Amino acid sequence: NRQDFPEVIYCAGKTNQQIAEIFLNLFNHSQKNIIASRATKENYEAVLKLVPTALYDEAARIIYVQRDNTPVDDKRFILVLTAGTSDIPVAKEAGLTAQLMNNKVEYCFDVGVAGIHRLLARKDLIDKANVIIVAAGMEGALASVVGGLANKPVIAVPTSVGYGASFGGLSALLAMLNSCAAGVAVMNIDNGFGAGRLASMINHMR
Amino acid sequence: NRQDFPEVIYCAGKTNQQIAEIFLNLFNHSQKNIIASRATKENYEAVLKLVPTALYDEAARIIYVQRDNTPVDDKRFILVLTAGTSDIPVAKEAGLTAQLMNNKVEYCFDVGVAGIHRLLARKDLIDKANVIIVAAGMEGALASVVGGLANKPVIAVPTSVGYGASFGGLSALLAMLNSCAAGVAVMNIDNGFGAGRLASMINHMR
Amino acid sequence: NRQDFPEVIYCAGKTNQQIAEIFLNLFNHSQKNIIASRATKENYEAVLKLVPTALYDEAARIIYVQRDNTPVDDKRFILVLTAGTSDIPVAKEAGLTAQLMNNKVEYCFDVGVAGIHRLLARKDLIDKANVIIVAAGMEGALASVVGGLANKPVIAVPTSVGYGASFGGLSALLAMLNSCAAGVAVMNIDNGFGAGRLASMINHMR
Amino acid sequence: NRQDFPEVIYCAGKTNQQIAEIFLNLFNHSQKNIIASRATKENYEAVLKLVPTALYDEAARIIYVQRDNTPVDDKRFILVLTAGTSDIPVAKEAGLTAQLMNNKVEYCFDVGVAGIHRLLARKDLIDKANVIIVAAGMEGALASVVGGLANKPVIAVPTSVGYGASFGGLSALLAMLNSCAAGVAVMNIDNGFGAGRLASMINHMR
Amino acid sequence: NRQDFPEVIYCAGKTNQQIAEIFLNLFNHSQKNIIASRATKENYEAVLKLVPTALYDEAARIIYVQRDNTPVDDKRFILVLTAGTSDIPVAKEAGLTAQLMNNKVEYCFDVGVAGIHRLLARKDLIDKANVIIVAAGMEGALASVVGGLANKPVIAVPTSVGYGASFGGLSALLAMLNSCAAGVAVMNIDNGFGAGRLASMINHMR
Amino acid sequence: NRQDFPEVIYCAGKTNQQIAEIFLNLFNHSQKNIIASRATKENYEAVLKLVPTALYDEAARIIYVQRDNTPVDDKRFILVLTAGTSDIPVAKEAGLTAQLMNNKVEYCFDVGVAGIHRLLARKDLIDKANVIIVAAGMEGALASVVGGLANKPVIAVPTSVGYGASFGGLSALLAMLNSCAAGVAVMNIDNGFGAGRLASMINHMR
Amino acid sequence: NRQDFPEVIYCAGKTNQQIAEIFLNLFNHSQKNIIASRATKENYEAVLKLVPTALYDEAARIIYVQRDNTPVDDKRFILVLTAGTSDIPVAKEAGLTAQLMNNKVEYCFDVGVAGIHRLLARKDLIDKANVIIVAAGMEGALASVVGGLANKPVIAVPTSVGYGASFGGLSALLAMLNSCAAGVAVMNIDNGFGAGRLASMINHMR
Amino acid sequence: NRQDFPEVIYCAGKTNQQIAEIFLNLFNHSQKNIIASRATKENYEAVLKLVPTALYDEAARIIYVQRDNTPVDDKRFILVLTAGTSDIPVAKEAGLTAQLMNNKVEYCFDVGVAGIHRLLARKDLIDKANVIIVAAGMEGALASVVGGLANKPVIAVPTSVGYGASFGGLSALLAMLNSCAAGVAVMNIDNGFGAGRLASMINHMR
Ligand SMILES: Nc1ncnc2c1ncn2[C@@H]1O[C@H](COP(=O)(O)O)[C@@H](O)[C@H]1O
Ligand SMILES: Nc1ncnc2c1ncn2[C@@H]1O[C@H](COP(=O)(O)O)[C@@H](O)[C@H]1O
Ligand SMILES: Nc1ncnc2c1ncn2[C@@H]1O[C@H](COP(=O)(O)O)[C@@H](O)[C@H]1O
Ligand SMILES: Nc1ncnc2c1ncn2[C@@H]1O[C@H](COP(=O)(O)O)[C@@H](O)[C@H]1O
Ligand SMILES: [Mg+2]
Ligand SMILES: [Mg+2]
Ligand SMILES: [Mg+2]
Ligand SMILES: [Mg+2]
Ligand SMILES: [Mg+2]
Ligand SMILES: [Mg+2]
Ligand SMILES: [Mg+2]
Ligand SMILES: [Mg+2]
């Protein structure tokens, strides 16, 4: 059924050898898509030796196999927004995760609040989306603005982008938690995977 | 339409006079339900003088008028869980908010992880729910356990319940943000209203 | 000359007696305006006994005497914006301070980012202002949006408005420090006086 | 006697030379087991030149000599649980420490709360154990669940496993300190050695 | 059996009415001791009306009924130490909890490290104790010194005693977590109950 | 017009390739100065291949093209002060930014408060400056002293210079936010660019 | 001998009864001065009943008896400086403590760094003093400036004076710890007593 | 005169070239000792080329020239204590600094509180010392114990030795600030230089 969740491997803290073996095992004993998140190029090379059809998205840091052919509902898409270009890796981790869970995903990068008209110019996308993911570092203000524009669930992912008093994403995290816009929920700093997973759950609700 | 959102007043930092007047104004110029959150008994007495049909839920700290007769879909309910009894006010803020937005709400209190069998005994409720809200203070572990048991969106609300190193809810907040269970999103500390609002949005998706 | 700065008393931590005597002293030995900030009603009553012409602005918590008749340049005004109604006291502390330093001040309250169109509707004011002060609590996002819309100095004052993870204004403070909009400088939490003082300095530059 | 404690060297901040010499000295002047914790492979190579019978457990980062033949009480064992695979090094530091102090140790890895049934499936082990050590990072919730299931001392070791708002183990540390389950005591982040030492003390009580 | 645990009510956040009813219920349906912790005098007066034999220890903030006549093993006692006089309430919460769980308890107050000879003068007590609880605020150093003197489990309870950079007990908490003495485990700030409970568990091990 | 702002590229988190292309694009499609901040030598080499007239200031970490010939008002200069020599890179980032925005800039390094007479010896510069930027790490006290000496806007930039309890610039940041001198506004830690940009805005006001 | 230390009672957390009895006891069994710090007026009234010659300094919050007639060396004095008027209570706690330990004490209030000339005007006092205590809140910069002016020990006491990002004295504490002036040592926030005690020790060295 | 202070260079953040030139300059234009602190071996090699008589203490990280022949008062010595071996570099930075300022220095390493008898065995040294420096990381408890044993100034230097919840020295810093022993003052984390400088000042008082 649509809710079917791909098998997921979290690579951080695992050896190439471990990752490749778990990947092969999932490949052989399931028919689902496979996601290995937080994967390095080296991890990918190890997987490739055992599973030659595995693909790698460097920006999203995901190794994957996409073999689930369930048709995707093109009218219900997840919109992934970023405040800046440095937030794109987190956005792609979220987007590819959602895509591998059979969702249509649209992206819109670099629409941070310091140039609010770039965001407003994409109001149509915000209006048509079914669920929205916002990845933003520094002051994390994009989540509140989008939360105010959209009458639908907004999943806010603070990123560790920034320096000084951004304290590794703390600044964006606190801002998003304190959002004065209703309908905004927050993930851990840089947790694109979790955002994609939750957005997929919501997007498949009927 | 179902998505129709009641009018909401956030009482903290407003005078009795201000609250009562805004309430009356909404009452006169809209046909929607009305929610005044974080309201004290004194706030209520002031409102009552201008809007005699207003009701007050002391636990939830909400003054409200419920006049929207849109039929509620009884098969899709929001489940609100708490770890302890002290988390109940936050849970009720969430639940009544969702109810006033035309959702069926079920509660299940005091199912914290230190007595995991009380939670497991309610696995049926978790399975039947459409969206789940978890309110927990102290170590906030309930969100992770529920996130693992449920294949549906879980909205985690850390509460300020606790003492010492709970640091006013920080402990539960960090725990929930770091949840190893997929599908868990986090609200601000004690933000029952936001959780109810988001749960309602998700629950109305078709 | 225009830069002339009124005499200022910071009341917090002073007794009624001390405040009244310093106030009288300034009143007798200077021709400037007088500002006593962070003043309570009780402080005012004590001052009034010694200086019957003293006025009190309760919202701004300022006792003052305005006797400097230097004409104010009406074409160069300072705009004071707030995200919500609870930020108004800080905004008024800033505004009245600037006014007593011979500036024209305009206010625009409750234009927080969760309803971005209310802010955009006042784009004319932003365009015409010479200097802008933004007072916002919670996620403090208004400073970034205004900083992006305005090509002029923006003085951001985080307020202690909020609860939970706002940590007494820390959330807004960090957000403002990390603003991705150029031209934004930050004051201490709730420091309306400092914002008004700096805005006045900038507004008088020729 | 049973309480006899092996000699312990804390390697962090010592040179290869220093470690090897202290190790040799203990080897020559005592009959006890020897533990050198937080040891690198390089440390081991230096020790090996002076004490050829020394062994090295890479996962536990411990160099040791086991020569104490006091029989171990097999009916009283210490159970070491981990939430995930990345917590295993800390768990092994604890386990090997306890073992070198003449305790039987059982391990059970990867029984984190997001999959509570894997933990419940090992309820028998929890029931039979005399003392339990729980190593968990991220949200650290495992300690509370185990504390609730077990009527025996639970020693909780927060690990630095996680990212973003785990803040190097702070999240798990706070969660464990705030555990609502009675009988849970907490060690420093990643302090497997201390947990093994305390568990051994308790396990030898008669 | 000896491990039998009294029934416990945590009063913080419960009404007089709720506490009295739960207390009466436990009184009627069990034969165990009853502990109601964090109780105020008002709580006690409410309980007294329903359970006239209930007692109250104001320092320990505990309402209790002691009716379990299991003989206590007088040779195995729990020693409760405090650094200063202000730590006594926490020490008594720990001690009375342990006593109501059928343990002999000895106290030794005001033996903080700034006068180390007062502590050393009680070395005999430390040597004879089976388990030790240390309650200390400010710099929390007593736990380390005792941990070094004693070859037995030490349960350290940081207290919120202090001012300035003690940050409500954080200073003592961090110090205790970083104790360089082996065998020291840490409880939440001011958690005397948890310390007494764990000490009792350990003291009953055979 | 004078307010004309150069095009700015923030290099952190961009590839050499991306930076060089954006730089070339700005070079070809605008007549303004170009600033690429937080640039490494490697970044510069990539830019140089596409834009041979680009220059690099290693201390300021800025790649730039200066081709705007608007005459600079030499009577209104921005003064950039540092407490120590390690603060110079931040000061130069601020100064070069302002210079590329058509401002005259004067520097005065190593006038920290521990040798107050070195600062007082430059009182003339402080008096003549139109706007002042203060870059200081460690205790950040220079901002307050300068704020007290100068009756003009002071832009304080905390730097990450220091060790131990400077916590990466937090110490200087908090000190500057709490400055008891009126007219001091604060930027993010190490944000020389923002300080230069704001100083330029203020310096061009008429 | 001169080093003779008065008897000291720390009143915080003691009852009137306890304080009065300890005071009387010291009064009867010693010939030294007596200091009871952090004392309220109520504490004093209780003491007065038992020791009619006891005095009370309200600002310093000290109850004392001064009966030690050892002649004081008038050429070696301790200088106590404050940044503002709100720091005076801490300064007086330090000064009276030192005085009761047989030191000559000079005060100089309100010489904060925002008006550096008021401080420089008292350079003679700084030059003549033997030891200097600096009490300052907010940005705590006075310690560094004095440390630079004086070639003698400077004891810095951060005070909790301030608001917002002063975080109860944290701002001044960090600033003082990071002082770039050599010879500055730091006490706990508001710890005037400790500063007076240490200054006295140093002042009596020969 | 005795108070004469050597010339000091703080090497962190300076180039080899800069350090060598400043060193040579001081060497040529003064007759005092020279200290270059926080120096690397590379820094030393650069200095050596210009000043062949310069020496380097690797543990203390100090390059120095000792040519001041003022006789040292051998009866007044500064005692430098450490809790562990990892604190020795900080202790040596303090000790060599004091020595180069014409003080006799005694060391006593590894006398941490977990083995209190090793400290008590050196009570004679504590009694004879004129000033004491305590360097300790982790729980920093040594400062309090020494402060209680000694009736003389104790300068506490928290070190960054530790892991987990030591948070880079914060744990020891807070413990030392909260010391319940009178006469203890605190330096920045790892600031051996400052401790040596202040100890020297005090040791030269007559
Ligand atoms: N990038 C990520 N961040 C957080 N959690 C993740 C991430 N990727 C995978 N996970 C979770 O980690 C689990 C797999 O962990 P493991 O069994 O250690 O490979 C999955 O079920 C996911 O819920
Ligand atoms: N609300 C305020 N916040 C921060 N600083 C203030 C405030 N009001 C006045 N001040 C400053 O405090 C100084 C007066 O302090 P005082 O001499 O203690 O009355 C003035 O010169 C102002 O710079
Ligand atoms: N002072 C205390 N601190 C922490 N936990 C406590 C305390 N007193 C009781 N508890 C725990 O709280 C539980 C009872 O909570 P409740 O059901 O809310 O009354 C008990 O089983 C104890 O484990
Ligand atoms: N290790 C150190 N930690 C803190 N301050 C130091 C240290 N070494 C030297 N200093 C101070 O730094 C000043 C020299 O700084 P600089 O002019 O940058 O070389 C000296 O006067 C000392 O007061
Ligand atoms: Mg919305
Ligand atoms: Mg789930
Ligand atoms: Mg702008
Ligand atoms: Mg248990
Ligand atoms: Mg021990
Ligand atoms: Mg000024
Ligand atoms: Mg000095
Ligand atoms: Mg002492």
Image (spheres, coloured by chain):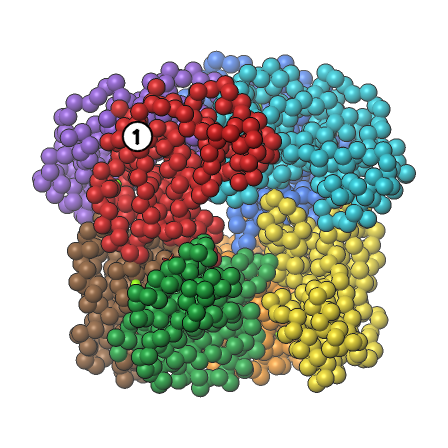
Chain colours: A cyan, B blue, C purple, D yellow, E orange, F red, G brown, H green
**In which quarter of the view is residue B184 placed?**
top right
Q: Tell me if D158 is positioned left or right of F87 in this view.
A: right
Tag 1, which chain? Answer: F
**In the image, residue H22 lies at what x, y percent?**
37, 59
| Residue in the picture at 83% in, 51% down | D121
What is the secondary structure assignment of the residue under circle 1? helix
Check mark 1 vs ligand 7: CB closer than 8 Å? yes or no: no
| Residue in the picture at 82% in, 48% down | A17
| Residue in the picture at 74% in, 24% down | A103
Q: Which residue occupies the foreground of this view, F116 or H39? A: H39
Tag 1: residue type?
A: Asn
Res A53 seen here: yes
* Quadrant showing the N terminus of chain F: top left
| In this view, B28 is above or below B49 | above
**In the image, residue C198 lies at what x, y percent?**
29, 34
| Residue in the picture at 65% in, 19% down | A129
**In the image, residue B109 lies at what x, y percent?**
66, 41
Q: Which residue occupies the foreground of this view, D2 or H111? A: H111
**In the image, residue B83 lies at what x, y percent?**
65, 45
| In this view, H40 is above or below C118 | below
| In this view, E155 is above or below A31 | below
Q: Tell me if F140 is positioned left or right of E135 in this view.
A: left
Q: Which residue is mark 1?
A: F203
Q: Which residue occupies the foreground of this view, A197 or B127? A: A197
